[in-house]
Image (cartoon, rainbow, N blue to C red):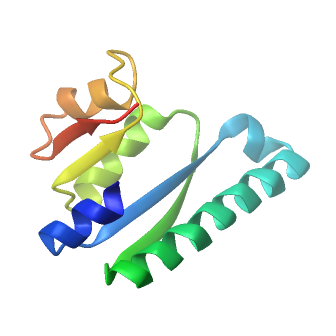
Amino acid sequence: MSMRLGQRFGARVTLVYVVHRGERDDAGASRDAVGRGDALFARARRVARRLGVACACRFAFGDGTDGMVAEMVTRLACDLVIVPRADDAGPLADVRRRRSPADVLVCP
C-alpha cells in the first residue's frame, strides 16, 4: 500500500526494518533478522521499480521501535508514517509526543 500511495503522490517511500536488541546481541538471530529485512527490501524494490516509485530501505538497530520511528521521521523529513497498529504505548504514541509534523496512517 505504501508503494501505491507513493505512486499517487509522486513521493519517495522509505522502508525501515527494525532489528531489536535481543536479536542484535545474538549473532544468529541478528543474521536471521537482517536476512528477513533484506528479503523484504528486495520485494519492495521490485514493486517500487514496477510502479516507478523512488524507494529507500534502511535498517534500524536498537532497543525499542518507539524512539527509533520518531527519530527516523525527523531525520528523514517524513510526511506520512504507516504503522501496523494504533498502540498508545508504541511508535504512534512517540511520534505524537514529539509533535512530529508527519501524519500517521494505521494499517493493520
Q: State left or right for residue 35 relative to residue 105.
A: right
Residue 101 relative to residue 104: left or right: left
Please state the horizontal and vertical placement of residue 40, each as a whole percent of the image.
61, 61
Residue 89: percent from the left, percent from the top? 38, 16
- Give the answer, above or below, for where 59 lies relative to 83: below
Instruction: Return the residue nearer the eye: 8 or 27.
Output: 8
User: Is residue 70 at all visible to an observer of this figure?
Assistant: no
The number of numbered badges drawn on the structure is 0
Residue drawn at (42%, 43%), measured in percent from left and top?
68
Q: Quadrant of the C terminus?
A: top left
Picture quadrant where residue 11 is located: bottom left
- In the rendered image, residue 97, in percent from the top left (x then y), is placed at 20, 26
Where residue 94 sits, quadrant-wise, is: top left
* 89 with respect to 102 (left or right): right
Q: Residue at x 23, y 72 (%)?
A: 7
Residue 10: in sight, yes or no?
yes
Instruction: Give the farthest residue toward the top.
Output: 88
What residue appears at the point 19 percent right and 34 percent down from the top-left corner? 98
Question: In screen coordinates, is 65 left or right of 54?
Answer: right
- What residue lies at 68% left-to-right and 38% top-to-bottom? 21
Q: Residue furthest right?
A: 28
Quarter containing the N terminus: bottom left
* As drawn, 22 above or below 6: above
- The location of residue 64, given as percent across then percent down, is 52, 33
